[in-house]
Image: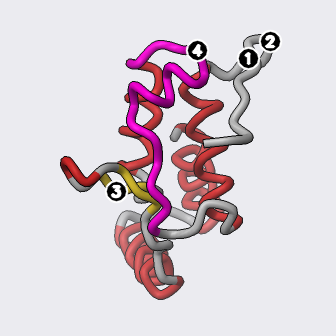
Amino acid sequence: MPDLALDPSLPEPPFEQLRSQVAARAASGDLPAGTRLPTVRALAAELGIAVNTVARAYRELEADGVIVTEGRRGTFIAAPAAPADVGAAAAALAAAARRAGVTLAQAQRLLADAWSSD
């Protein structure tokens, strides 16, 4: 996968740099849905990093719905979530927050904290 570069001088660990680059390229369409990604071992060798570093980035990307692994077929960029899916999740969050007595400002802080902790 060309154009991936890890910078050891950055405070973010290599797995996070890799995760964020793949996620950004998928979101921008630079890596369209269905694009096959290199195997963990191949990408680790290409970037000169540990296999476990790439494996962790792939696990986190899969947990975020950015990629899907289809067994022996390989790992692919997933189809983007439909805006309706995100809207439904936002509605569920709002309803749960209201039931719990959480203010809008508190809910926004919770969402911001969850967003940045990934």
Which amino acid lies under the numbered mark 3 shown in the image of this protein?
A: Val
* Nearer-N-terminus badge (4/1): 1
- What's the distance in space between the residues labelled 4 and 3, CA to CA? 24 Å
Label number found at residue 48: 4
Residue at the disc numbered 3: 68
- What's the distance in space between the residues labelled 2 and 4, CA to CA? 16 Å
Which sits in the foreground, 2 or 61? 2
Q: Residue at x 42, y 74 (%)?
A: 89
| Mark in front: 4 vs 3 | 4
Q: Residue at x 50, y 69 (%)?
A: 33
The part of the chain drawn in magenta is 34-51
Dot 4 and dot 1 residues touching (CB under 8 Å): no
Residue at the disc numbered 1: 11
The crowd level at tag 1 (other Cα within 10 Å; few <14, some 14-19, many 20+) is few
Q: Residue at x 54, y 37 (%)?
A: 117
Residue at the disc numbered 2: 9
| Mark in front: 4 vs 1 | 4
Which amino acid lies under the numbered mark 4 shown in the image of this protein?
A: Gly
